[in-house]
Image (cartoon, helix red, strand yellow):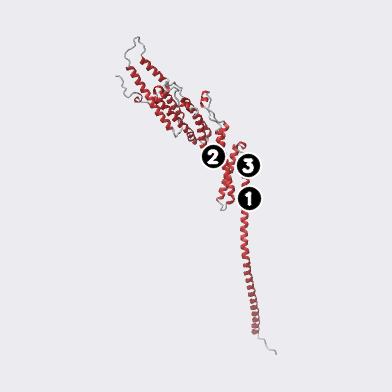
C-alpha cells in the first residue's frame, strides 16, 4: 500500500515553492525599478537644459513681441507727428492761426502722453528720438507764433502824433481781425511757461512804438520860447502837444489791454502799468526839464508853470485807478511845480505892495496910476491861466501864497 502523503508537508512544500516564485518576481521588479530610476535620472538630466532653454526662448519671444509692439507704437507716433509737421511747415498765413495752434496743442498732448508713459517703464529708450523731435518741433512752432505776434504788433508804424492832433484824427489802432489774432495767441500761451515771455513782448513792443512816436514831439517840448528874454505866450510850448499825445496814448493802451485781456481781467492793471511806466518816466523827465527852465527865468516863463499844472493834473486824472510803479514820479512833479506857482502868488502880492508904496502923488487929471496899470496887467495875466491857477490853489494854505512878512492892515 503506497505511503500516505502528509498534508501539512505538502502545504509547506507548495508554500515554499510559491515563496521562491514571489522572491524571484520581487527581485525582477526591483531590478526593473532600478532600471526605470536610472532611465528617469538620465531623462531628467537631458530635459533640464531643454526646459531652461525653453524658458529662455519664451522670455526672448515675449521681449521680441514687446519690441515689435514698441516699434509699431513709435512708427504710429512718428507717422502722426510727421503728418502734423507737414501742416506746420506750411506756416501760419497758409494754414490759419486757429488750425496752427490746434496742431501744436495735439503735438503737446502727444508729448505729455509719451512722458507720462515713460514714467511707468524701465526701458524707454525707444521713444527718446521721437520725444526729442516733438520737443524741438513744439519749440519751433511756438517761436513762429511769437514772430507772428510781433508782426501784428508792428503793423502800426511810428508816426508823428502832432499830425493826428492837428487834423483831429484818432491815433492808429488795430483792426478787429488783428485784435482777435493777438488775443488768440495770448490765450494759447496763458498759463504755460511761455506766458510771461509773450506778455513781455506785448509790453516791450507797445512801449517802444509809443516812445518812438513821442520822440517826434520831444524836441519841441524841450523849448518854452524861441526867444530867451521874450515873455511866454500862452499855449505856445510844445509841452502842451506832448501832453495831449500822451493822454491819447494812455487812452489807446487802456482800450488795447481791455480788448486783449477781456478773459483775464486780473492781468489788466499789471500789463497796462508795464506799458505806461516808460512813458511816465519820459514825461516826468521832460516835465522836470521844463520846470528847470521856468525857475531860471520866472519873470518871462513863470506863468508857463500854470500850464504845467494843467498838464500834470490831466495826466494824473487819466491814470486814476491805475497801479503804476512809478506813479510817485508824477507826485514829485506835482510837488515841485506847486512850489513854483506858490512863489508866483507870493511875488504877485509883493509886487502889488511895492507898486502901491511907490505911489507918491495922484495924477492931476485923476488918471490911472502906473502902479494900477501894472497890477491889473499882472492880474489879467493870472486870469488867462484860470484852470492852472485853480489847480495850483488846490489845498493851498494861507502861509503858502502870502509873503512871510505880510501883515494885514488894521
Where residue 95 sits in the image (x, y, percent)? 62, 37
**Which quarter of the rendering shows the N terminus?**
bottom right
Residue at the bottom extreme of this rendering = 1
| Outermost residue, front side | 228
The residue where tag 3 is placed is 86
Whether residue 257 is visible here, answered yes or no, is no
Crowding at dot 2, Cα within 10 Å, few <14 / some 14-19 / many 20+, comes out as some
Where does the C terminus fall, quadrant-wise? top left
Q: Residue furthest right?
A: 1
Q: Which of the 4 image quadrants contains residue 233? A: top left
The image position of residue 387, as x and y in percent, is 43, 23
Q: Earlier in the sequence, mark 1 or mark 2?
A: 1
Residue 171 vertical position relative to residue 376 in the rendered view, above or below: below
Residue for badge 1: 72
**Left or right: where 85 falls relative to 358:** right
Give the alpha-carbon distance from disc 3 to disc 2, as whole Å.
22 Å
Q: Earlier in the sequence, mark 1 or mark 3?
A: 1
Alpha-carbon span between mark 1 and mark 3? 21 Å
* Residue at point 63%, 61% (across, down): 54
Crowdedness near tag 1: few (<14), some (14–19) or many (≥20) residues, C-alpha within 10 Å: few
Residue 74 position in % (x across, y down): 61, 49
Residue behind mark 2: 189
Cα–Cα span, label 1 and label 2: 33 Å
Amino acid at each position: 500500500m503506497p505511503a500516505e502523503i502528509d498534508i501539512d508537508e505538502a502545504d509547506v512544500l507548495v508554500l515554499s515553492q510559491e515563496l521562491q516564485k514571489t522572491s524571484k518576481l520581487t527581485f525582477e521588479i526591483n531590478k526593473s525599478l532600478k532600471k526605470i530610476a536610472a532611465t528617469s535620472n538620465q531623462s531628467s538630466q537631458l530635459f533640464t537644459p531643454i526646459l531652461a532653454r525653453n524658458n529662455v526662448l519664451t522670455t526672448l519671444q515675449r521681449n521680441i513681441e514687446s519690441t515689435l509692439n514698441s516699434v509699431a507704437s513709435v512708427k504710429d507716433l512718428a507717422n502722426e507727428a510727421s503728418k502734423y509737421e507737414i501742416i506746420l511747415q506750411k506756416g501760419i498765413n497758409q494754414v490759419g492761426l486757429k488750425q496752427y495752434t490746434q496742431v501744436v496743442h495735439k503735438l503737446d498732448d502727444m508729448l505729455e502722453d509719451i512722458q507720462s508713459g515713460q514714467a511707468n517703464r524701465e526701458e524707454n529708450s525707444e521713444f527718446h528720438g521721437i520725444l526729442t523731435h516733438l520737443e524741438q518741433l513744439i519749440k519751433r512752432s511756438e517761436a513762429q507764433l511769437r514772430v507772428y505776434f510781433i508782426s501784428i504788433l508792428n503793423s502800426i508804424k511810428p508816426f508823428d502824433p502832432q499830425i493826428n492832433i492837428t487834423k483831429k484824427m484818432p491815433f492808429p489802432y488795430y483792426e478787429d481781425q488783428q485784435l482777435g489774432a493777438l488775443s488768440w495767441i495770448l490765450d494759447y500761451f496763458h498759463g504755460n511757461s511761455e506766458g510771461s515771455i509773450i506778455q513781455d513782448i506785448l509790453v516791450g513792443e507797445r512801449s517802444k512804438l509809443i516812445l518812438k512816436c513821442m520822440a517826434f514831439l520831444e524836441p519841441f517840448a524841450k523849448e518854452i520860447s524861441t526867444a530867451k528874454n521874450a515873455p511866454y505866450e500862452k499855449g505856445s510850448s510844445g509841452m502842451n502837444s506832448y501832453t495831449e499825445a500822451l493822454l491819447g496814448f494812455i487812452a489807446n493802451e487802456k482800450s488795447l489791454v481791455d480788448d486783449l485781456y477781456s478773459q483775464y481781467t486780473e492781468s489788466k492793471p499789471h500789463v497796462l502799468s508795464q506799458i505806461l511806466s516808460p512813458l511816465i518816466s519820459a514825461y516826468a523827465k521832460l516835465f522836470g526839464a521844463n520846470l528847470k527852465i521856468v525857475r531860471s527865468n520866472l519873470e518871462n516863463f513863470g506863468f508857463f508853470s500854470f500850464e504845467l499844472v494843467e498838464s500834470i493834473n490831466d495826466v494824473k486824472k487819466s491814470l486814476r485807478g491805475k497801479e503804476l510803479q512809478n506813479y510817485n514820479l508824477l507826485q514829485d512833479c506835482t510837488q515841485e511845480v506847486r512850489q513854483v506857482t506858490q512863489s508866483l502868488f507870493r511875488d504877485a502880492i509883493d509886487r502889488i505892495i511895492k507898486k502901491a508904496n511907490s505911489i507918491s502923488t495922484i495924477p492931476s487929471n485923476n488918471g490911472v496910476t502906473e502902479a494900477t496899470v501894472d497890477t491889473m496887467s499882472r492880474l489879467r495875466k493870472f486870469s488867462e491861466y484860470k484852470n492852472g491857477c485853480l489847480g495850483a490853489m488846490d489845498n493851498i494854505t494861507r502861509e503858502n501864497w502870502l509873503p512871510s512878512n505880510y501883515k494885514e492892515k488894521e
